[in-house]
Image (cartoon, grey):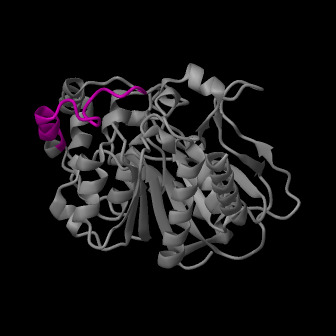
Amino acid sequence: MKRLLGVAILAAAVLGLATASRAGPVGERHLVTTDATAALRDAQHRPQVRVTVWYPAAEGAVEQRIDLGPPGRPLFLVGAVAQDAAFADDRRRPVILFSHGFGGAARMMGWFGTALARDGYVVVAVDHPGNNGIDKMTAAGAILTWDRVQDLRAALGAAAADGAIGPHLDLGRIGVSGFSAGGFTALVSVGAKVDMRRFQAFCRQSPTDGVCAPQKEFALSQEDAERALAAPDLAAEAAHAGDDHTIPSVRAAFAIAPAIVQALPPDGLARIEAPVAIILGDADPVAPPATNGLVAAKAIPHAELKVLPGVGHYDFLSTCTAAGVAAVPLCAAIKVPQDPTHQAAIDMALGFFTKTLGAP
């Protein structure tokens, strides 16, 4: 009985935290922009990047569920938004750019983006070409990881130029966030340098490390990745991996279970000047903390770090339903309830961005 009471109190506390940040409806708008590298990564060689924008909507806007999966039998619970609703007011609000994980999508991380929007931020997320769960995955989309930053840069430009969205953006207060490969994207956005040879050398020495093994979403071996990078159609783009990919207007980065950190030399991480916060789970076999998030936290000056006990990698996806657990291997790997993990990430992000960008 005491245990049940404790669980009930914890659940009530979590619900109270969640409710506290949900002051009003969230709007969702969609844009399409172009990126010169997108055609190289997209299976159909389209130059487009899809953009999803979440924002505080006007009172009375009617929200509808955007859960993922078959109608009436969702696999992932994402939340609810009001499509193309008017903005809550005329204020300019801080902007958070968001990058999803390997093979994910903007909406897969909607639990996080909509929570920030309810608190007053405008969240600009993308579906990375050739590396999302909607389109066909490609080798180029999987390995040209530094080009993800260009997707965010293009999305920010499109949102700023849009007549309905642009007037509500405070372009002097921009942050970036991302999950897994998106966490890598966030770090590169604020100045981390990319060295793919360093990553390849690490994977030769540690082939069983989670970031080196073929991923469930797209089983590309490291040998196949190296051959693809050396091929003529990608070699020219690969030569730009080590360029400066910083988005100068970004003032702070929040990384969720960052991956591919071995492609970021420690001396480059040490030169990051923007504030950085990292949250991860200590039971993550996909982006093992010891070779990813903890490495970044140690190298980046004054980085904030939160480690969640018992939490794995896919815990940070949208909440899996019973149908999702039965049908999706990523869901079956989750061992603890996801909602407390999500709330911890939301709370940390809101505190961090309020401190670094100012209250929305």
Residue situated furthest right in the rendering: 60
- Residue shown at the point (67%, 56%) measured from the top left: 9
On whether residue 90 falls in the magenta region, the answer is: no
**Image quarter hosting the C terminus:** bottom right
Residue situated furthest front in the rendering: 1
Please tell me how many numbered marks the rendered image carries. 0
Residue situated furthest top in the rendering: 327
**Image quarter hosting the N terminus:** top right
Asked if 201 appears above or below 341 in the picture, the reply is above
On whether residue 216 falls in the magenta region, the answer is: yes
- Residue shown at the point (50%, 64%) measured from the top left: 348
- Quarter occupied by residue 113: bottom right
Q: Give the range drawn in magenta.
A: 199-217
- Quarter occupied by residue 124: bottom right
> Where in the figure is residue 325, as x and y percent of width and height?
57, 26
- Residue shown at the point (48%, 45%) measured from the top left: 100
> Where in the figure is residue 320, as x and y percent of width and height?
60, 34
- Magenta span: predominant SS is loop
Q: Is residue 346 left or right of residue 209?
A: right
Seen from the viewer's position, the closer of residues 154 and 351 is 351
Seen from the viewer's position, the closer of residues 295 and 43 is 295
> Where in the figure is residue 140, as x and y percent of width and height?
34, 32
Asked if 10 appears above or below 358 in the picture, the reply is above
Seen from the viewer's position, the closer of residues 196 and 1 is 1
Question: In the rendered image, is residue 164 in sight?
Answer: no
Q: In this view, does 317 lie to the left or right of 250?
A: right
Asked if 206 appears above or below 120 in the picture, the reply is above
Question: In the rendered image, is residue 308 in sight?
Answer: yes
Seen from the viewer's position, the closer of residues 288 and 228 is 288
> Where in the figure is residue 209, as x and y percent of width and height?
23, 35
